[in-house]
Image (cartoon, grey):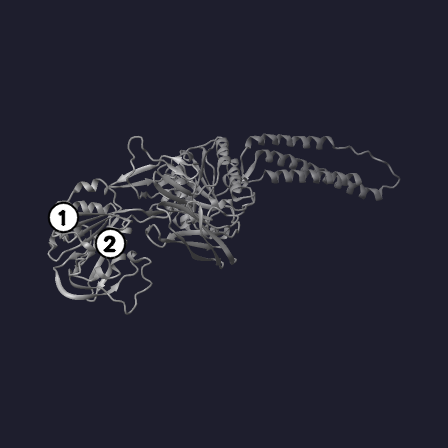
């Protein structure tokens, strides 16, 4: 036992008061004479012994009462072996989970309010001159500073729910890094959360040995010292290093949630008049099946599709929502459902870029290909241009073809000059699409120089012979929605000669059409942000009847249609990866800096735009936190909340206790009862078990015993 205020022991001199009273109460007995005292003598002796004993007991009770009252003022405690506060101040870091799952019901109306109350209880357990940090899910730079108690409480009052969904291991590392920079002798971290399974990655927490090694540079070498030859750190040494992390679970609400998880389109690109299919995944993570969940799709403010779905408990389903494309340009909309009380995940925003006229350039070496001209020249979707290989105008790449979302076709060039090869390589790397159609008289060496740079298959010497196509890869993106399947009696294209396409260790390819001898007729290779299509034979009726087959049209037409960079229907508000801008023609120079604006103009910011090659990227820094549809000049960007918070299943106290038995987490502890005051728990851990209440109780018990003894005397 330790007396935290031993100066009050001076009060023990008050013991002399009951002793003085006892001495003053001593009485002289008066003798009474009787004729016969034989019978009274024994009674008199007995009463005198009882009276003396009672007086001594009363004195003892009074002395004990004084002693216990004095000890109560001295505030005795039984010190805890786990934490022992040392002189030198205390630094406290509190993580307050303010993610959307904290909107569920809790002891104080919502888990968010319960978390705030726990944060207030934490700081109430420390001295006013201690330093505090309040860290939330946003982890903003302004939160990495020390606060006084009053400043901390003011910041707690201002905390609102946020779409940010950090992993707890990352939060723990931030707390540890910040606390290590403190010069305080005592350092404590608290994590107040509902401990969702989706974000509570305790397995990735920094282990105790790593932290003890880092801590050694900030504290006395004797604190948490590891004996030589031992690689692990015991729980006692870690706790003596004056660092600890305490988990304060608030308990899950048990709310069942139905939410929209993902949305994808059935095709990478669309044109006017096409039918788009939005495939929406709906999840029911509850324990009860639901029927007739409504789904509504809106495009540019108009409802375009309606559906409903039945979901069993703990299941998911993908629902197709179809609508016709009757507008060009940027289409923005959302899919929504109805579910309470968790509503942040009941809507998915999306952006769809409908191509108007796609730039297409054909560079011909044997004259203009009539099949390509007839396919593209009169089509309203493509902007067809032809250029002879003998008169290449490289300035066109810096004018209307300066953007990379278009198709270049090399048609039967005899060779590929190094300047053109370098320009085409950069074009593909920046996201362009290149289709190569060789000629039997082509220079294999010049072609392979370009193909090798792009990691595409290489041309072997030309070979003659008639061969039919044996297989068409209908799963390739070129044929989305084209085939329902290949009939056994389907007429396949044939070739009268071809280049065998060879691969080496660096070749990347997907076979689109394969000949009967196993060699490919058409391959596609991803290169940089673009792709390369390579034919093994010229597209001319003298070499193949592919140009007369029905499959020719979707093959070439979709090469142009899908030449635009892959469209992402949406991004996440919590994402950090650069967002590609499809239309890179806007200027970010001078005063023409585009603003990122929401549909209702409540958000209007100047984003961080960066140019890489011929492409622009928007670099998010977490400045946009509200899901919705946004415009950046002529671009459309949709942002949605992460669905990591949609699964409301949490770790129970028993689960957390089991995980904390891992020796790596020896510096972590758990508050098992969310209803109990955290203030009392912290004080008990830091100061030991207080005994002053017991001293008061024993003092009252001694006074009660004295009163009882005096009443017994009166009765006698």
Position of 681 with respect to 403 (left or right) is right
Q: Residue 480 bears which disc, if any?
A: none
Q: State left or right for residue 2 relative to residue 59.
A: left
Q: Which residue lies under the disc numbered 1? A: 389
Q: Nearer the viewer, residue 357 or 234?
A: 357
Q: Dot 1 surroundings within 10 Å: few (below 14), some, or many (20 or more)?
A: many
In the image, 419 versus 489, the foreground residue is 489
Q: Is residue 6 above or below residue 304?
A: above
Q: Quadrant of residue 227?
A: top left
The quarter of the picture where residue 426 lies is top left
Nearer to us in this view, 553 or 65: 553
Q: CA distance from mark 2 to mark 1?
A: 20 Å
**First in sequence: mark 2 vs mark 1:** 2
Q: Nearer the viewer, mark 2 or mark 1?
A: 2
> What residue is drawn where x is 23% and y is 43%?
401
Contact between marks 2 and 1 (CB within 8 A): the answer is no
Label 1: state its secondary structure: helix
**Spot occupied by residue 127 in the image (x, y as percentages of width and height):** 50, 33
**Whole-percent x, y for residue 462 in the image:** 12, 60
Would residue 563 be seen by someone viewing this image from the given angle? yes
Where residue 641 appears, as percent x and y from the top left, is 42, 45
Residue drawn at x 31%, y 44% as measured from the top left: 582
- Residue 375 has which mark? 2
């Amino acid at each position: 036992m330790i007396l935290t205020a031993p100066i009050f022991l001076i009060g023990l001199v008050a013991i002399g008061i009951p002793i003085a009273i006892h001495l003053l109460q001593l009485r002289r007995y008066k003798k009474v004479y009787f004729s016969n005292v034989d019978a009274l003598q024994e009674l008199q002796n007995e009463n005198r012994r009882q009276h003396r004993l009672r007086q001594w007991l009363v004195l003892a009770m009074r002395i004990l009462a004084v002693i216990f009252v004095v000890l109560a003022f001295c505030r005795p405690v039984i010190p805890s072996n786990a934490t022992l506060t040392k002189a030198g101040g205390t630094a406290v870091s509190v993580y307050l989970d303010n993610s959307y799952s904290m909107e569920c019901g809790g002891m104080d109306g919502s888990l968010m309010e319960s978390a705030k109350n726990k944060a207030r209880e934490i700081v109430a357990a420390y001295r006013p001159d201690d330093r505090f940090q309040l860290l939330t899910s946003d982890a903003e730079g302004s939160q990495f500073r020390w606060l006084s108690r009053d400043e901390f409480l003011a910041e707690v009052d201002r905390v609102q729910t946020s779409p940010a969904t950090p992993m707890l291991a990352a939060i723990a590392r931030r707390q540890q890094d910040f606390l290590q920079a403190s010069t305080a002798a005592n350092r404590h971290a608290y994590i107040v959360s509902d401990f969702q399974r989706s974000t509570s990655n305790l397995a990735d927490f920094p282990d105790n040995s790593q932290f003890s090694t880092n801590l050694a540079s900030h504290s006395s070498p004797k604190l948490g010292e590891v004996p030589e030859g031992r690689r692990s750190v015991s729980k006692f040494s870690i706790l003596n290093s004056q660092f600890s992390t305490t988990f304060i679970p608030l308990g899950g609400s048990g709310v069942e949630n139905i939410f929209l998880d993902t949305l994808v389109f059935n095709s990478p690109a669309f044109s006017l008049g096409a039918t788009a299919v939005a495939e929406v995944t709906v999840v029911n993570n509850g324990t009860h099946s639901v029927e007739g969940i409504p789904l509504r799709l809106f495009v540019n403010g108009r409802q375009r599709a309606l559906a409903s779905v039945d979901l069993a408990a703990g299941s998911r389903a993908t629902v197709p929502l179809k609508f016709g494309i009757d507008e060009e340009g940027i289409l923005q909309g959302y899919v929504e459902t109805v579910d309470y009380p968790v509503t942040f995940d009941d809507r998915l925003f999306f952006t769809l870029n409908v191509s108007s006229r796609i730039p297409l350039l054909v560079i011909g070496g044997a004259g203009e290909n009539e099949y390509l001209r007839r396919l593209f020249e009169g089509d309203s979707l493509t902007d067809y241009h032809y250029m002879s290989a003998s008169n290449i105008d490289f300035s066109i790449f810096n004018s209307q073809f300066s953007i990379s979302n278009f198709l270049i076709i090399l048609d039967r060039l005899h060779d590929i000059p190094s300047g053109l090869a370098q320009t085409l390589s950069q074009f593909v790397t920046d996201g362009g699409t290149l289709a190569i159609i060789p000629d039997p008289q082509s220079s294999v060496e010049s072609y392979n120089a370009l193909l090798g740079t792009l990691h595409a298959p290489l041309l072997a010497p030309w070979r003659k012979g008639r061969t039919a196509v044996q297989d068409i890869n209908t799963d390739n993106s070129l044929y989305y929605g084209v085939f329902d399947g290949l009939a056994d009696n389907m007429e396949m294209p044939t070739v009268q000669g071809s280049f065998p396409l060879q691969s080496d260790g660096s070749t990347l390819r997907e076979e689109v059409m394969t000949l009967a001898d196993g060699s490919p007729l058409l391959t596609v290779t991803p290169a940089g942000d673009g792709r390369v299509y390579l034919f093994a034979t010229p597209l001319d009726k003298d070499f193949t009847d592919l140009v007369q087959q029905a499959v020719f049209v979707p093959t070439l037409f979709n090469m142009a249609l899908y030449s635009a960079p892959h469209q992402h229907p949406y991004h996440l508000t919590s994402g950090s990866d650069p967002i590609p801008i499809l239309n890179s023609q806007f200027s970010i120079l001078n005063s023409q800096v585009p603003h990122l604006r929401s549909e209702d103009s409540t958000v209007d910011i100047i984003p961080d735009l960066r140019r890489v090659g011929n492409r622009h990227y928007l670099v998010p820094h977490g400045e946009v936190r509200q899901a919705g549809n946004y415009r950046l000049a002529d671009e459309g960007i949709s942002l949605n909340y992460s669905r990591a918070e949609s699964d409301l299943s949490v770790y129970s106290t028993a689960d957390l206790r089991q995980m904390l038995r891992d020796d790596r987490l020896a510096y972590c502890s758990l508050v098992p009862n969310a209803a109990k005051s955290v203030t009392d728990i912290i004080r008990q851990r830091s100061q030991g078990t207080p005994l002053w209440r017991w001293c008061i109780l024993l003092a009252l018990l001694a006074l009660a015993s004295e009163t009882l003894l005096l009443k017994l005397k009166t009765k006698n």
